[in-house]
Image (tube, helix red, strand yellow):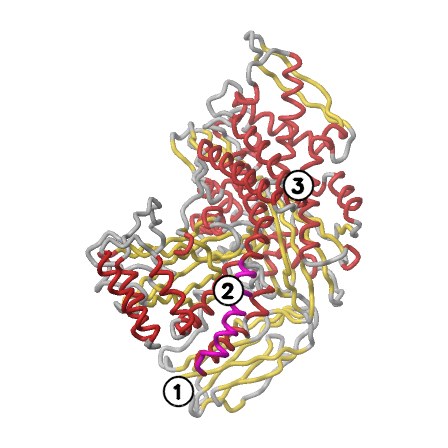
Amino acid sequence: MINFGIDLGTTNSVFARYQEGNVEIFKNPIGHKETLPSVVGFRNERILIGDKAREYLEKDPRNVFGSFKRKMGTDESYWVESIQQVKTPVDLSAMVLKELRNFIYTGEIPDSIVITVPASFDTIQSNATKEAGYQAGFGEVLLLQEPIAASLAFVNKTTEKTDRKWLVYDLGGGTFDLALVETKYGEMKVIDHEGDNFLGGLDFDNRIISRIIIPYLDRIAAFENLDHDLHSSGGKYNKLYYVLQKKAEEVKLTLSAALTASIEFEIELPDGSTKEVYFDITRAEFENVIRDLVIRTIDIVRLVLERNELQPNELNCILLVGGSTFTPCVREWIAQELDIIVSTAIDPTTAIAAGAAYFAGTKRKQFISPAKPANFQDLSIKTGYAKVSQDTEEYFVAEATGKIDNLQYRLTRADGGYDTGLRQFNSRITEFLQLLPQANNQFELRIFDAQQQLVYHDSSIQIVSGKYGILGQPLPHDICIEVDDKENNTTKLELVFARNSSLPLKTTLTKSVSKTIHTASGDSIVINILEGNQGAIPSSNLSIGIIEIKGDQLSVDLVKGSDIEITLEMSESRDLRVTTYLMMSDQEFTNLFTPSARHVNINKLLDEIKGLHFAVTQEIRAANIREEYEVSQRLSALINTLNDAEAEARTIAVDDVTDRKYQLDDKKKFVAAQMDMLTRDKLKMSAKLDYFNTRNKAQDVLVSHGNDEEKTRFSNLLKQEKQILSGDTTPAIESLTTQIRKIINPIYFRTPAYLISIYHYYASLDEYPDASEAASLKDKGDRSIANSNYEELRYIINKLHTLLPRKEQEKANIKGTGIS
């Protein structure tokens, strides 16, 4: 088993090991602390990690780096003056992970590891975390969501076995995670989750700087633009900013136990003189500047409760995890605002690492297989059993393929308390293994040939009794594919994997080529996989992988309408593999995506905020016209959020050293999602109305002119109606409407009344360039109607249509994806 787990935190990291049913938190051999500050410093040729790096921060802040977890998955990098090199967040995280390996006092060198990530981390951030693990020298890296880790530590600490439901409130140094969790039938499952990747203790520290320290300094001297000069990498006071970060954190920690904290530092005034600054900050002042941040986390709690139709009294507790939950007002306000029992049953600092170790104890290393003698390679065994159990016995199954004649097997428990004895082996083994309570039960499977020679041995079978396992990690966001929407000359999202689905996941889609791709052309098919909200426009979601199949890669022309099979697989650690099979050319393209880093340009962000401001304003006007005043009011609140975001964006320097631009980008995406949610009902109502009109017309025309095959197809479509209409996606309703139209349109052209009405429309037009030809066709049409020759009438309608001039369209068609 993997057995080793790491909480790679924004401010501190922790390393733990699982062994025989228990978890041990490793301590730093220097100082014997259980936590390692996630800080890296460079002093000439020396690399400082942890407390030594934090101490060096005040002396040389330009060569000391922390809080880099918040920039995982971005294109941000750090220039290290001391060594004249660039380091990325992945590089620095790998250094912290390497240092944690030194905590192991037993001499073990783990080659596999479980590393925790925030539940709201997207695929790019998750991949960056795995890359840091590989750079640190681990051969195998599994990811575990932090709320799940905390819950594993929680449920495995107590002997209570009743079914429970609780919230995990994880407020760490850099991120906030909330998860709704339950235990049932001996399994633990995450029902729902929400979070903010840029909300944590670091933001508390920054509020002390921006709303207490900077205003104080502006009162004692005439600084021109102190905020800008602190946050800009080229600013006069940028070095002081890093000093103030450490000072602010010290103030925050002091105010957790005291009502007043002192802050002291030195600053150069605008006139060139130096001043020693010393003043007190009260707990009340601190709580006042962070109140809206804490309330934001409470609003997220309310959102999850509302989404799952839960009342506070239906929950056993809200479990507090993360160092920032030591802040007294966080605990007080949660209890006051939510009326849920607050639990501090586990150590907020080490719980996530402990849960990671529990999880690691149930995960077998992927690249190690049971030993098999070289002279018996034709036997393959697959085993199945629960890694954790609440029962006194557990069901075990093994299936074999290959040479299985005249074999016997024997299953034993390591302590000798369970032994099946030798039994006949007939391709399948089923046993109920007896378990020792509250213990790690180790079993061995041995298979012997007719001469009692060992031909197979598996000693890795472990079942932990009295502990909980997890029923799959939930997918944090919808995974969608972008497809062409020809009717609206744009593209749209089609759901592949729904949010909160249990990982791992796999599915195969069959799509059509929406345009002919010639082998010699510059055209291409684009398979774009996105992560975010399935109901939003593609541009508001995060692209996590693109496959572009160009014309020069094709062996034959790909004709419009031909089929493509797209198979998508996502592992428990969020590796995404996409296989595309082109049926016409019999070609296969496979990609294991490693998504590119997230990039946010402050000027582009400003433009996007302005564009979104205009879009929301237009929706407000439309809502007022429809007299939907509640929608209008909620949209107006988004305008206020956008105004605040635009104002803040204008203060951010291009070389800003903080992560404020990422916070604003997330805020922009949040507003876009809210606008989409508030206006989605309008679009959905229109789609439903169109559906019912089309369905009713179809029922009428099928009764009078439909054949049995068309009626059967229509009846099968109606079976999907209830499920699709109760869903939340307009595209699904539109798709059902389109399928019904495909059935009834050919029927219309068999209906005399419809053909006559269409003919009269074309006959009324006078814009035919060849007027004599049109007149001749109209005469024939009139005779066809008189003679009830509707087959000929169909032909005349088509001829009249082709005589019409082509109207030049100013609207340029989008390039699109090439699939629909």
Secondary structure at numbered mark 2: loop
Residue 403 tag number: 1
Q: Residue at x 41, y 82 (%)?
A: 379
Residue 390 figure quarter = bottom right
Residue 677 relative to residue 762: left or right: right
Crowd tier of the residue under label 3, counting other residues whose Cα lies within 10 Å: few below 14, some 14–19, many 20 or above: some
- Label 1 or label 2, whichever comes before in sequence order: 1
Secondary structure at numbered mark 1: loop
- Label 3 or label 1, whichever comes before in sequence order: 1
Q: Residue at x 30, y 63 (%)?
A: 560
User: Callout 1, which amino acid?
Assistant: Lys
Overall secondary structure of the magenta stretch?
helix
Q: Quadrant of the C terminus?
A: bottom left
Closest to the observer: 725 or 287? 725
Circle 2/circle 3 CB separation < 8 Å: no
Q: Which residue is mark 2?
A: 504
Residue 633 tag number: 3
Can residue 37 be seen by looking at this rendering? yes
* Residue 694 included in the magenta stretch of the image: yes
Can residue 49 be seen by looking at this rendering? no
How far is mark 1 from mark 2, CA to CA? 32 Å
Closest to the observer: 353 or 144? 144
Q: Position of residue 285 (x, y in %)?
A: 74, 28
Residue 27 tag number: none
User: Callout 3, which amino acid?
Assistant: Gln
Q: Which residues are magenta?
A: 687-707
